[in-house]
């Protein structure tokens, strides 16, 4: 069993990385952003900030990225 997210806040579990990657890829495609662009980097930073801030629901993360 994995420790809680709060205990190891600097580490991401594989399933968390998969979730974030899926949301990131969908946002890139929806906004026609190239993966190696400054816009993609800003999107990734926003996504990680939201996740580290406690937003864990995939739909909510996606919605908040759209609003940004």
Image: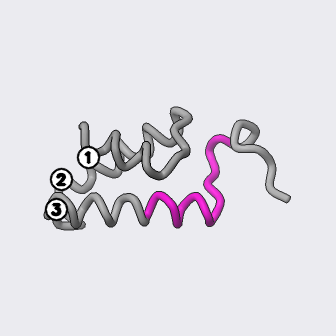
Q: From mark 2 to mark 3, how far is it between C-alphas?
A: 9 Å
Q: From mark 2 to mark 1, how far is it between C-alphas?
A: 6 Å
**Image-based side of 37 in relation to 59, left or right:** left
Instruction: Identify the residue under disc 2.
Output: 38
Disc 2 + disc 1, Cβ < 8 Å: yes
Q: From mark 3 to mark 1, how far is it between C-alphas?
A: 11 Å
Crowd rating for badge 1 (residues with CA inside 10 Å; few <14, some 14–19, many 20+):
few
- Residue 33 is situated, as x and y percent measured from the top left of the image, at 16, 62
Of the residues tagged 3 and 1, which is closer to the observer? 3
Tell me, yes or no, whether the highlighted magenta stretch contains residue 61: no
* Image position of 8 with respect to 34: above or below: above
- Residue 31 is situated, as x and y percent measured from the top left of the image, at 16, 58
Crowd rating for badge 3 (residues with CA inside 10 Å; few <14, some 14–19, many 20+):
some
The secondary structure that dominates the magenta segment is helix
Q: Secondary structure at mark 3?
A: loop
* Circle on res. 42: 1
| Image quadrant in which you'd find residue 6 | top right
- Residue 24 is situated, as x and y percent measured from the top left of the image, at 35, 59
Instruction: Identify the residue under disc 3.
Output: 33
Magenta stretch, residue numbers: 9-21
- Residue 40 is situated, as x and y percent measured from the top left of the image, at 24, 56
Crowd rating for badge 2 (residues with CA inside 10 Å; few <14, some 14–19, many 20+):
few
Q: Residue at x 65, y 41 (%)?
A: 9
Spot the residue most to the left.
Answer: 32
* Lower position in the chain sequence, tag 2 or tag 3: 3
Q: Quadrant of the N terminus?
A: bottom right
């Amino acid at each position: 069993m994995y420790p809680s997210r709060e205990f190891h806040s600097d580490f991401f579990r594989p399933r968390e990385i998969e979730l974030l990657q899926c949301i990131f890829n969908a946002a890139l495609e929806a906004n026609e952003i190239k993966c190696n662009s400054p816009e993609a980097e800003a999107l990734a930073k926003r996504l990680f900030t939201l996740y580290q801030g406690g937003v864990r629901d995939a739909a909510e993360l996606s919605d908040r990225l759209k609003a940004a």
